[in-house]
Amino acid sequence: MTQHCWQQALISTALLLSSVNNLVLCYAQVMEFYCESCETAMCLECTEGEHREHVTVPLRDVLEQHKSALKNQLDTVRNRLPQLTAAIELVNEISKQLAERKNEAVTEISDTFDDLEKALHQRKTALITEVENICSTKQKVLQAQLTSLLQGKENIQSSCNFTEQALSHGSATEVLLVQKQMSERVSALARHNFPEQPHENGHLECQVETDGLRRSIQNLGVLITTGAVGHTSVATGEGLRHALVGQHTTVTVTTKDKDGELVKTGNAALRAEIISADGVCTEAEVVDNKNGTYEVGYTMRSEGEYSFSLLLYEQPVRGSPYRLRAVKPSDVLQSPDDVKRRVKSPSGGGGHVRQKAVRRPSSMYSTTKKKENPIEDELIYRVGTRGRDKGEFTNLQGISTSSNGRIVVADSNNQCIQVFSNDGQFKMRFGVRGRSPGQLQRPTGVTVDMNGDIIVADYDNRWISIFSSDGKFKNKIGAGRLMGPKGVAVDKNGHIITVDNKACCVFIFQSNGKLVTKFGARGTSDRHFAGPHFVAVNNKNEIVVTDFHNHSVKVYNADGEFLFKFGSHGEGNGQFNAPTGVAVDSNGNIIVADWGNSRIQVFDSSGSFLSYINTSADPLYGPQGLALTSDGHVAVADSGNHCFKVYRYLQ
Ligand SMILES: *[C@@H]1O[C@H](CO)[C@@H](O)[C@H](O)[C@H]1NC(C)=O
Ligand SMILES: *[C@@H]1O[C@H](CO)[C@@H](O)[C@H](O)[C@H]1NC(C)=O
Ligand SMILES: *[C@@H]1O[C@H](CO)[C@@H](O)[C@H](O)[C@H]1NC(C)=O
Ligand SMILES: *[C@@H]1O[C@H](CO)[C@@H](O)[C@H](O)[C@H]1NC(C)=O
């Protein structure tokens, strides 16, 4: 910028248009032009000067352009207002409800304790009354006895007095006169049976055992609430989407709080609603497992399409409402092809139901159809069979996906990479066997970076090869450092992370091959590995590594510091028999291929077991790499079956 422009720019800063960097208007000289490379306005003189080589356009045009861009941005952001308004209403409503619930609870507490006080008072009165009654009954008996004893005593005394009087003071005549009468009376009194033994006892006491009651009172009243919210809680089970008419079906809801942490207590208000298109409701029953999970059971009465809503505190559980399809068991029975096999009916009552077994065509061209059979497992499709042709595999290992809808497979023993669309259509294949740069010897891991480049860990060549999205070799990295790279992933910074299975450590490279850091060594501690295989990066840029021989999944931060691990050896929920492929979804859930148990397990971001992917209809055989497709499904390299499979999960 020339000197005069600088001065004028200072004077006219007030005229700056805020959104356009460095855009100034000349004071005396009109700034009519705009340099796109420098993002600045200038006068005619400047276009001839230092901006001579740059593209300059009339300022007016740029202004219009910027104004309309700004307007668009404004519109976009303004369009968010209704959502925010709705959210504010909802949160306000919940806050109001909470306040009401609180008042109700306070009223409930006061009423209950008032009642209790009343009951206590009544009992006190009753006890006192009874004490009085018993006492007075006993007293009556005693009084009667006393009366009769006193009476006797007086009789005796007066008779004695009288007789004594007569004896000492009376004349002979008088004595003789009373002698007979007195003698009879005195001897009668002498014989008389006075009630000399007490007719009652003085026993009356009150015992009140209050310890238990006191303890009860101390623990009286429980406040019930949870932190569970709908949008993080998940429902699992085939029954979310498919049901057989007349057969009891259940799905499981796992409640979570706003941070996605499992809620471990029950009592959340969960409601299920199954409605057909014409508004007919099917009853669903919710069983509270009291550990934060709930079983929702229902039985469809007629076939058709339904909307299945799961509402947690009246807010939809993740993915709800689901589209539920109910079919007659007979429709499933009568599939003309295929072997039939017997499967025990879950309801038990109906004995056995015949079910179609899955024999999938092996040609890739006929396997891309979405399956229709509603009681199959969660498989969407499978591609491939053992072979050397396009769409065939020999011991495939790694699998990856790209944001533009591709599935990329490391076809290990065919020394090539094959690329498919998200729906399983073969797209292309590249790779030549060999030990020179650009050739493949044993591709095991594969990943796709932000630019769409395909990054391949080559176990036997001991380096990482980078290819463009159309398969042209670009570069190799890690040669001379790596001993046996297996899994590979790319993090948010574009760093290439590879698991060196032989060296038992994790290498982090810049995309140009410069080593950033490495961590791990052979061993059994948290910082060591007993046979690391695959790696994934989560949304926090943390590194998730499967440790095959330690039967665990270990999580590290981007600097390689150990964070936590999960899993142990076994066949139970959350246990592994040699974990291999691993992927992390956008919610942080960790999906792990369990090689020896030939299954796929889903964990939440903290490593708590959530569910299995149901692979029962067409079992896996030694699954290896695993990835999430851009449309939210799980793609797994079913190595032992020489094919890859795509599943839905958590739904
Ligand atoms: C019997 O005589 C004594 C004195 O001799 C007198 O105190 C007493 O009251 C008399 N009792 C009756 C029942 O008359
Ligand atoms: C919760 O309880 C149910 C039923 O008792 C049980 O099947 C399930 O495994 C439990 N889940 C957890 C996460 O503890
Ligand atoms: C898995 O899918 C099969 C159908 O292939 C079904 O019979 C079975 O009940 C499902 N298992 C679970 C746990 O949902
Ligand atoms: C797995 O690693 C843990 C420590 O992270 C260790 O205590 C355990 O012994 C290891 N088990 C095996 C089978 O390597």
Image (cartoon, helix red, strand yellow):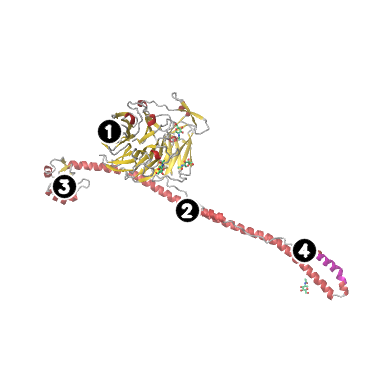
Check the image and name the residue furthest to the top. Answer: 336
State yes or no: Cβ of the residue under disc 1 lies below 8 Å from any atom of ligand 3.
no
* Helix, strand or loop: magenta stretch: helix
Q: Label 3: how many residues lie within 10 Å, few (<14), some (14-19) or many (20+)? A: many
Q: Quadrant of residue 601?
A: top left
Q: Which residue is mark 3?
A: 25
Q: Between label 2 and label 4, give the one nearer the viewer.
A: 4
Q: CA distance from mark 4 to mark 3?
A: 134 Å
Q: CA distance from mark 2 to mark 4?
A: 67 Å
Q: CA distance from mark 1 to mark 4?
A: 124 Å
Q: Label 4: how many residues lie within 10 Å, few (<14), some (14-19) or many (20+)? A: some
Tell which of 396 and 318 is nearer to you: 396
Q: Is residue 290 left or right of residue 165?
A: left
Q: Is residue 165 left or right of residue 567?
A: right
Q: Which residue is mark 1?
A: 469
Q: Quadrant of the C terminus?
A: top left
Q: CA distance from mark 3 to mark 1?
A: 46 Å
The mark nearer the N terminus, 2 or 3, is 3
* Residue 647 at x, y percent in the picture: 39, 33
The mark nearer the N terminus, 1 or 4, is 4
What residue range appears in magenta? 176-190
Please tell me the numbered disc located at residue 194: 4
